C-alpha cells in the first residue's frame, strides 16, 4: 500500500501517522521527493482502513498496490478455470450457450422452449422460478412449482438448469438445480454470497447495475473464500445516462475481466438491451470480444410470435444466432 | 396506460394487439392522429407487462399514467406522515438529528459518542453492528455484541437506536432495536423488504447507488404493502462519473420526493461525500432543501482527533453543525 | 405530439392550455380515460417548446411522436448512405479501416505509419494536427505544419486523410483534407456544425462523452440541414461510473443507430478504452455488432515498441487485427 | 509524479523505462517494497504524458502529485478572488443574485423582468441572445438584436448584463456586455477559452454535463493562462442515470471547489433541475452549501403566469426566494 502525503505536512503530524501505521505492525519506506512524500507500507496491510487513511487531512491519496481479491485473481491462478456442469464445460475455450424463457410459466412452455433451444445448440437451459420484481404487485414467479417444471424440462431434454436464487432460506429448494444464478440486485447481498460457499454447485454471478469490475470480483471472492470456487461471472449491462437501451452493455468488461481473473465470463445481451432486435448483434459482439458464453432469453409466446419484438428471441431467431455465434468463434480463433 | 403505436402500422397487427389487450379485460380508447395512433387503456392495467408491450415492433412507446406506487403516494395520503420513535417524532415539520459512529467498537466508544451527540442535540443514535463490506476479508462489525453495546448506550442516554439489518435471519436479534435501517445495497432485496412488513418498528430505507426515485418508492411500497407503514426514506448519494466525492449527493431528490410521497425524507451527507470536511456544508444544504432529518457519522477516535479528517465528524464539529442546522431551519420557515 | 394531463386537472386550466395550443395552429384530439386525459396535437408541432409544456403543473408528460431529425432519419431514407472518399466507399456493406497515429509528429513518423497501415489493409489514414487538450500547457499538435505532413504521407501512400477540425476559423487550412473529423467535445458546437454544411467533403462526427443517440443525430442534422449530407457517425465511448477503461464503449449504439439512421457508423475502440490491449477485442466486437468501419490508433514510437502497451497498436498488431476483422465480417455475413 | 510498477517486472524493461524518464530530464527516486516498486519523478513532469506511461504494460498506475492547474489553484492564491462587475462584487463573502429570462424576446419583456428582479434584489441581469439549441430547427435567439435589448434594459435598471457567447467570431458584438457566459457545451471549446484571455471582462464558466471538477478548473486555467484572471465558475447539474430532474445538481462541488480554487462559485438551479418548483429549495440548498451566488431564470410570460410551472420563476416567486436566500446566508454566517 502506498500513501502519498500532501505537500508541506507538519513534521509532527507526519510522525504521528507513521507511528500509528507502525503500530499496526507495518514497516514504512519513506520516499521524500521535492514536491511529495510517499510512504510505502510493507507487511499485512489488510488491517488498514484505506478510506480512513485517505480521508486524513495530511494525506493526498492512498493506493492499494496488491489487489484485494486473491482467490479469483489470475495472478495467482494463471490457468483459466473450467467450470463443469454435468457434461458441459465452461471456460478455457469451452463456450456455452444458455437459453430459455425469462419466467417459467407452464410445463408445456418450458418443455417446448427447452427442446427448441437444445435443437439450436444450447447446452444449458435458463428459466426464472423466483423473479425479482421492482413492484410488490407484480408476478414474482411460480417459485417451487417453477423449479419442478424446470426439472421436467431437464428430464425431457437432458439440459442442466440455470435459475435464480434470491433468498438464503430458499436454498433447500435449489438442491436439485444445476447452476444457481445470483441476480444483479443481489451481487452485494454479502450474507447470501457467503452462504453459497457451502453449496456444491456452480454459481453464475451477475454484475450489479452500478458495480465496478473490482466489486464484482470481490463478490466472487466472497463465494470462493467461503468454500465454493466454481464461480462464473456475468456482464449484463450497467446503468448510465444513455436511454435508448434498458442498460448499457459494457463489453470491454470481457477482455478486462479476462486479464484480472481466471473465472469464466458470460454475457447476457437480453437483459442488457431489453430489445430483442439488439440481442443478435450484441451476442455476436460479446462473442467477438472473447466471452466464454452467452445467456439469452428465448420464448414461444403467441404475443411475441405475433408481433416480432420484446426482449426474448423466438426459437428460430435463436437458432440463426447460434449459427452465427459459431462462425464468429471460428473467425477469432 | 397509454400505448403509442408507430407510424404506418399494418392494420392486421394493430387489430391483433388491441384484441390481446381487450383479452386482458381492458377497454381501449383509440385516438388516430395524422402521424400517430394512441391507445388509451382503461381498466386494471396492473396485469399489463409494460416492458413486453413496449418491445413490440409496432409500438413506439408505452406510458403508465397512474403511478405504480399507492401506499407511499402523496396523492392518496396528502398529509405528511409523522413517524414516532419513542418520544421522537419525524416528519411533517419534526426534524431529526441521527448521529453516532460508523461501527460500534466498544462500550466506552459508543457510550462516549452517544453522550456527546445527545449533548449536541441528536435525538436518535446510529451505530453499525452488522456492516456490509465489499471484501470478505474486512471487519464486518461486532454483530450481536454490537447490538448489546448499543442498548447499553441507550440505557445511559435515552437515545433510541437506529442500526442496519442485512439478513432476514438476523431479525430476532433486532427485537429490541428502535429503528431498522436497510442499506443501499439491500434496497432491492425484495424478500427482506417483504419481511419488514411484519415488523412493528420504523424502517429507515436507504436509496440504492443506482436507483431512481421511483424504484426507491416501489421498495418502500414493498414494506408498506406487507403491513408496515412506518417507513422513512434516505438519500445517501448516487453513483456517477464524478470522482471527487465517493458518491454524488442528489439533493433535488428531497423536494421531488416531498411531492411524490408523504413519507419522511432523511439525508446522509457522511456516506454521500465520504469526506468529513464536506459533511457540514452538505448537511446544511440538505436542511435548506427541506429534509426532515440528517443522519451523520460522529466518532471520538484518536487517529481522527489527531488528524482532522475522515468521513466522521468529531463531537465538537457535530455540535457546531447542529447549531447551524437549527439556524437554517429557522431561516427557511 | 402527445400531452398527458395530470389526473383531476381543473377544467379552466385545461381549457386555457388547449386554447393556447390551438393558438399555435394545432388541432387537438382529446382522449378522456378514467384516470387520465391525453391530448393528441396534430399539425406542425415544431413550434411547440416541449420543455415548457412538460413543466406546466397540469401536465404529466409530453411525448414527441415524430422524431425531430429528418434528414438523417432512416424512415425517410431507407437506403443506407454510401459516403465516398476518393475511391473509398463507406457504408451499405462497404467497410472501412481508418488508422494512424494519435498526433502527427514528424514526416518520418507519419509516412512510416501510413505505409504500415496501408500494407495492413487500412484505406484511410488518420492523424491529429490540431489536438484538443484538457490542459492549456499540453502540446496541442503541429497544426498547419501537421496538415502538410499528412499531405506528404498521402502523396507517398495514396491514403486519403481524416483529421480533426476544432475551430471554424481554421477551415481554410482544411481545404485539401479528405475527411474532416469533429471531436467529441465539439459535437454540440452548433456554429461549427452549421459551418460544415457548406463544406464539400465528408464529415466524421464523434459522439460526445455524455450525449444520447438522439443528440448525436440532431448534431448530424445540423450539418445536413446546412447543406452537407455526407456525414459519418462515430461511437467512441461514453462517460459512466465504470473506471477500468477511460470511457465505456457503448456498442449497442451500433445496431440502434442502424435502425434510426441511414448514415454510416464507425467505431473508435482506441479512445473508448484508452488501453491498447483492449483495442483488438473491442474492434472485433464492434465489427460483429455491425459497424461500417473502425478508426484505430497505430504508432511506431520507440517507447511503445519497447514496452507493449499504450492506447495505440503497433503496426504488426494492427495487421493481425485487420486480418481477424475480415474474418469476423465474413462470419456475420 | 509517482509511477507504481507492476509486481515482478523484468529488470530490463524497468531499466528502459527509467532511462527514458531520465532522458526527459527527470530525477528518479526508486522505492522498492516487498510487493511493489514506486518511482518518484522529481523535476518538471509537465512534459510526461501520463496516459502514455499509465498504459505501459509494466506500469500499474501513475499519479500526478502536483495538480495540473496553477493559476486557479487556491494553494497558490489562498485569498478568495473578488470579481468586480461595475459596482457589484462577487466572491469572498460577496453574494450575487443573477436573474432574468431564459431568452430575450422583446424590449417589453426584458425591461419588465429586469425591473422586477432588481426590485427583488438581483444585482446582475441574465438573458440569452445567442441560444445553443439541440435542434437546427429551433429558435436560436434574437442574436445581435437581443444584445441591444439587454442594453436597453440595463439603461433602464442599471443592472449589468450576463449573457452567453457561443462563437469566437461573435466576440466583437459582446464589446459592451458586462459578463460573458460560456455554456456547458462550450466548456471544452479550447480555442474559444483561449480567446477569452484577451477579453477585459469577467467570464462565467459553466461546468459541462459530464465534466469533472478538475476538467472545469483546467478550462478556467485556459482563460487565465491566456491573460484574463476574472473567472467565475458555475455548477449547473451533471448528467446521470437519474431521470426525475433534467440533470443532477452536484452541490458537493461547491465546498469541494472552494478548497481547490480561489475563484467565485455560482450555482444555477434552473438549468440543473428544469422544474420551477424545485428551483427555490435547490437555490436555498446551494446557498447553505456556501455558494457565492445564484443564477436564476425569471420570466413574465402569460403561459407561465397561467399555469404555474416551467423552469422559470415568476417575479413574485423570485422575490420570495431572494428573501429566504438572505435569511439562509445569515444563518450560516
Image (cartoon, coloured by chain):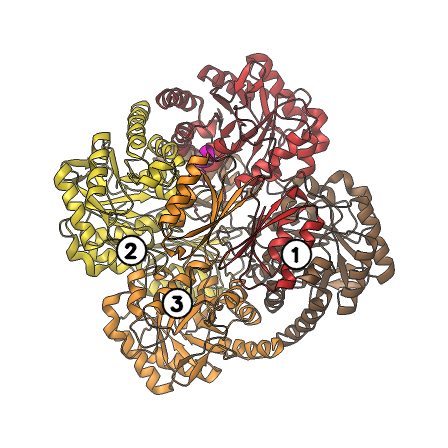
Chain colours: A yellow, B orange, C red, D brown
Note whether residue A252 is visible: yes
Closer mark to the observer between disc 2 and disc 3: 2
Distance from disc 2 to disc 3, alpha carbons, whole Å, reads: 22 Å
Q: Nearer the viewer, residue A19 or C323?
A: C323
What's the magenta bit mostly, secondary-structure-wise? Answer: loop
Which residue in the protein does label 3 denote?
A: B205
Q: Which mark is residue C17?
A: 1
**What residue does disc 2 label?**
A140
- Is disc 2 in the same subunit as disc 1? no
| Contact between labelled residues 1 and 2, with CB atoms less than 8 Å apart | no
Label 2 vs label 1: CA separation?
42 Å
Give the SS element for disc 2. Answer: loop
Chain to which mark 2 belongs? A
- Residue extent of the magenta highlight: C247-256
Please give left or right for residue A24 compared with residue C104 in the image.
left
Percent of width and height locating residue D72? 65, 53
Q: How many callouts does the rendering have? A: 3
The nearer-to-camera label among 2 and 1 is 1
Disc assigned to residue B280: none
Residue D259 left/right relative to B153: right
Q: Is residue C250 magenta?
A: yes
Give a yes or no on whether discs 2 and 3 share a subunit: no
Amino acid at each position: 500500500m502506498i500513501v502519498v502525503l500532501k505537500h508541506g505536512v507538519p513534521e509532527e503530524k507526519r510522525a504521528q501517522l507513521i507511528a500509528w501505521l507502525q503500530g499496526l505492525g507495518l514497516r514504512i519506506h519513506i520516499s521524500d521527493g521535492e514536491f511529495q512524500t510517499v510512504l510505502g507500507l510493507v507487511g499485512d496491510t489488510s488491517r488498514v482502513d484505506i478510506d480512513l487513511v485517505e480521508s486524513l487531512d495530511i494525506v493526498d491519496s492512498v493506493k492499494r498496490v496488491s489487489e484485494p481479491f486473491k482467490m479469483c485473481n489470475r495472478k495467482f491462478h494463471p490457468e483459466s478455470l473450467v467450470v463443469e456442469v454435468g457434461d458441459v464445460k465452461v471456460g478455457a475455450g469451452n463456450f456455452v450457450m444458455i437459453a430459455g424463457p425469462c419466467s417459467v410459466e407452464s410445463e408445456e412452455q418450458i418443455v417446448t422452449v427447452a427442446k427448441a433451444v437444445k435443437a439450436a445448440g444450447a447446452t444449458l437451459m435458463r428459466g426464472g422460478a423466483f423473479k425479482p420484481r421492482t413492484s410488490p404487485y407484480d408476478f414474482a414467479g411460480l417459485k417451487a412449482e417453477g423449479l419442478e417444471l424446470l426439472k421436467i424440462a431437464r428430464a425431457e431434454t437432458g439440459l442442466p438448469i440455470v435459475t435464480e436464487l434470491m433468498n438464503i432460506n430458499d436454498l433447500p429448494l435449489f438442491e436439485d438445480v444445476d447452476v444457481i444464478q445470483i441476480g444483479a440486485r443481489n451481487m452485494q447481498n454479502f450474507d447470501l454470497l457467503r452462504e453459497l460457499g457451502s453449496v456444491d454447485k456452480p454459481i453464475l454471478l451477475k454484475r450489479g447495475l452500478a458495480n465496478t469490475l473490482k466489486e464484482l470480483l470481490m463478490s466472487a471472492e466472497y463465494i470462493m473464500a467461503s468454500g465454493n470456487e466454481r464461480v462464473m461471472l456475468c456482464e449484463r449491462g450497467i446503468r448510465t445516462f444513455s436511454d435508448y437501451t434498458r442498460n448499457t452493455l459494457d463489453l470491454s468488461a470481457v477482455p478486462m475481466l479476462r486479464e484480472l481473473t481466471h473465472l469464466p465470463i458470460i454475457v447476457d445481451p437480453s437483459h442488457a438491451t431489453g430489445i430483442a432486435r439488439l440481442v443478435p448483434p450484441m451476442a455476436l459482439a460479446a462473442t467477438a470480444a472473447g466471452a466464454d458464453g452467452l445467456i439469452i432469453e428465448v420464448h414461444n409466446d403467441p404475443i411475441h410470435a405475433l408481433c416480432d419484438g420484446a426482449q426474448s428471441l423466438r426459437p428460430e431467431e435463436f437458432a440463426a444466432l447460434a449459427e452465427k455465434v459459431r462462425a464468429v468463434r471460428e473467425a477469432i480463433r
